Image (cartoon, helix red, strand yellow):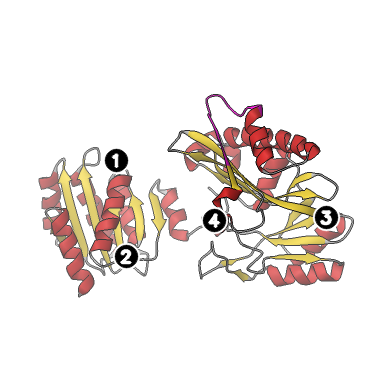
Amino acid sequence: MKIHEYQAKELFRSASIPVPDGRAAFSVDEACEAAAELGGYPVVIKAQIHAGGRGKGGGVKLAASPEEAREAAAQILGMNLVTPQTGPEGKIVRKLLVEQGLNIARELYLSLLPDRSTASIIIMASEAGGMDIEEVAARTPEKIVRVAVNPLLGIQPYHCREAAFGLNLEPEAARQFTTMLRNLYSLFVARDCSLLEINPLVVTAEGAIIALDAKIDIDSNGLYRQKDLLELRDTGEEDPLEVEASQHNLNYINLSGNVGNMVNGAGLAMATMDIIKKAGAEPANFLDVGGGANAEMVENGFRIILADENVKAVLINIFGGILRCDVLAEGVVQAARKTGINVPVVIRMEGTNVEEGRRILADSGLNLITAVDLKDAADKISSIVKS
């Protein structure tokens, strides 16, 4: 689950991590009030969307007077902000963050994220802050310092020293950085974060270390421990179909292709997407209904797939184990009768009660195409796509 910058900074404040003074605003007038409360100019007006690269898209503006603050807020609020992370469709800006301006001497990069290959938490730091870290990693990887922390042992003083030395910090700045990094690590673990990123982390002309930006992603699997963080979810920033799917406990990700797919199991879902690509088409979604799905969940999944106007065909690929093939068939038939089928549907089933599932599909009277195995399913999807 993603949260906004202003929400992440509230979590930073609660963890004693220095951030600029500022507050969120939801209208131009509120932005002007917030700027006046800060007690001096310049101030920074920042668009609040779930994407990075806002400055390049015109979503961050510096204002040196009340008039400039009002003009900047009016320009940003309501704009369709396009960044490399939003895609060409962009995102509508509905919220702003108004912050005090800082006298910046250096811009750094800092993040924490899990590394599944080493079962560790990685601290990534770079002197090349304020830039596209992906570009830095590709062109000058030597500028990125990586420090692995064993989560069973936790962060140690030598981890902090290694990161601080990699950033070439002066002794006083290094001391502040060490305290902040320990607090960031504690926040990362306590709040079940999957990403914590500060870009840029700045050193001011006065020598203070301050998180000028804040990005936090929460591991959705840990939200049952983080009830208060659920209140920070902004469904207006998410794909409507993905929001609806989450309400039915479905693992759904909307993509830009033309063949919808429903599968039980993440690995099988990835293989099914490969099959669709090999057939000469593009997957329109990732949908894992899970091993414990019932007929109602299958029905909801099928309905969500068909709600995507880009879908021209559907491939259902189920290995019947906990989710029996007859339960899947009943769910598909229920959904098809309620929503209507206006695209070809290929169904490949194998496993528990497969014959009963095929009988239910055959007796439904619906135009459902049954495949006997993966090759047969791929051939039929290919024929549909090419026609």
- Asked if residue 364 can be seen in this view, the reply is no
Q: Is residue 131 magenta?
A: no
Q: In which quadrant of the rendered view does residue 255 lie? A: bottom left
Which residue bears the numbered disc 4?
134
Q: Are marks 3 and 2 in contact (CB under 8 Å)?
A: no
Residue neighbourhood size for the residue with mark 2, other residues' Cα within 10 Å, grouped as few (<14), some (14–19), many (≥20): many
Q: Are marks 2 and 4 in contact (CB under 8 Å)?
A: no
Kindly report which numbered mark, 2 or 4, lies closer to the viewer in this rendering: 4
Which residue bears the numbered disc 1?
291
- Asked if residue 69 can be seen in this view, the reply is yes
Element on which disc 1 rests = loop
Disc nearer the start of the sequence (3/4): 3
Q: Which mark is residue 63?
A: none
Q: Are marks 1 and 2 in contact (CB under 8 Å)?
A: no
**C-alpha distance separating marks 4 and 1:** 36 Å
Kindly identify the amino acid type of the residue bearing the numbered disc 2: Glu
The part of the chain drawn in magenta is 146-157
Q: Residue at coordinates 24% horizontally, 37% vertically from top-left?
A: 322
Q: Are marks 4 and 1 in contact (CB under 8 Å)?
A: no
Q: Quarter holding the C terminus?
A: bottom left
Kindly report which numbered mark, 4 or 1, lies closer to the viewer in this rendering: 4
**C-alpha distance separating marks 3 and 4:** 26 Å
**C-alpha distance separating marks 1 and 2:** 25 Å
Q: Which mark is residue 103?
A: 3
Q: Are marks 3 and 1 in contact (CB under 8 Å)?
A: no
Which residue bears the numbered disc 2?
282
Q: Residue at coordinates 40% horizontally, 45% vertically from top-left?
A: 249
| 70 to the left or right of 314 | right
Disc nearer the start of the sequence (2/4): 4
> Looking at the image, is 366 positioned above or below residue 149?
below
